[in-house]
Amino acid sequence: MRVMLCVAFAMAITAGSVVLGQTDSMVSTTTHITTDGQIQLVIQNNYTEPMTAYAYDGSYLAPGWTQPLGAGDIVDLLFRLRMGMGDPIAPGQSVTVALGGHGSTNLQISLHGAVFADGATSGEDVWVERILRQRQFEYDEINIVEKKLRDAIANGSDLDTLANQLESEGKDREARAEKNDRDQLRCIRSVWAWTQGIVKSALKQGLKRDFILDAELNSLEKSRKQLSQSLPALKENEN
């Protein structure tokens, strides 16, 4: 299911003010300026399932020029969940996004799209597709790393050797990726570097190889299944 969302609005706001954004059946927003001039975008989930990703940006507006706020991107909450950095936005709950900035200014804040746990989407097609494309990259990289860990278990590779292999192959995959495709590069780096970090940490702590590799495989498999729920071509195979 897709609901069209257009939360792009220009405004003049001052410190301490609250500006209502736009509401649809799935997402609503407000923008706050704190007393010290910091800009905050509050995104609320109005849907019946957790919001697992969103895309936003913002710019200062002035006659003859536009300057990005320096913040804005795709935020994939499933990735953050895997790293222990937060959870999807539950139904009826909200998240506050810090956009920086200072003082009174003209702004354009845009929430471009959102994806939910059951695969429903809201927003501009191009941004929703970018979210899903990034998830496809991450799904593919997880598959490759999972195979690498299983091979390490089967072959009896020690953690030091495995960490070096993950670092080397991760860099090789970066080199072969599209140089200007930051979404693909980010997914490669996040999956490979994160798993490499887990292995190196286990090595320093003297943890048993099979224990840590089994735990990381379980974590990767859970993430892969969660990602597949928003990728229609994969849903049937994952169920």
Image (cartoon, rainbow, N blue to C red):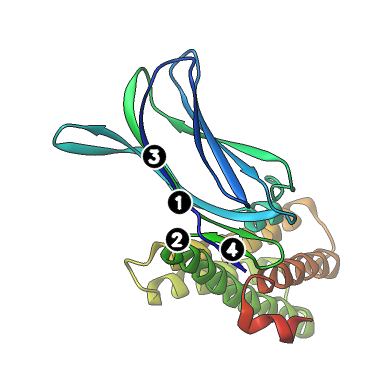
Residue behind mark 1 = 6
SS label for mark 2: loop
Q: Are marks 2 and 1 in contact (CB under 8 Å)?
A: yes
Most foreground residue, 157 or 180:
180
Residue behind mark 3 = 9
Query: Vertically, is 177 above or below 61?
Result: below
Residue at coordinates 46% horizontally, 14% vertically from top-left? 36
Amino acid type of the residue that numbered disc 1 sits on in the rendered structure: Cys
The disc label shown at residue 124, or none: 2
User: Which badge, 4 or 1, is on the more N-terminal residue?
Assistant: 1
Residue behind mark 4 = 121
The disc label shown at residue 32, or none: none
Residue at coordinates 46% horizontally, 48% vertically from top-left? 56
**Marks 4/1: CA–CA distance:** 13 Å
Most foreground residue, 166 or 117:
117
**Marks 4/3: CA–CA distance:** 21 Å
User: Which badge, 2 or 3, is on the more N-terminal residue?
Assistant: 3
Classify mark 2: residues with Cα within 10 Å, few (<14), some (14-19) or many (20+).
Answer: many
Q: Position of residue 229 (x, y in %)?
A: 69, 72
Is residue 151 among the parts visible in the rendering? no
Amino acid type of the residue that numbered disc 3 sits on in the rendered structure: Phe
**Marks 3/1: CA–CA distance:** 9 Å
Most foreground residue, 127 or 221:
127
Residue at coordinates 23% horizontally, 39% vertically from top-left? 66
Res. 164 image quadrant: bottom right
**Marks 2/1: CA–CA distance:** 7 Å
The reply, left or right, for residue 66 in relation to residue 149 is: left
SS label for mark 1: loop
Q: Position of residue 136 (x, y in %)?
A: 55, 74
Classify mark 1: residues with Cα within 10 Å, few (<14), some (14-19) or many (20+).
Answer: some
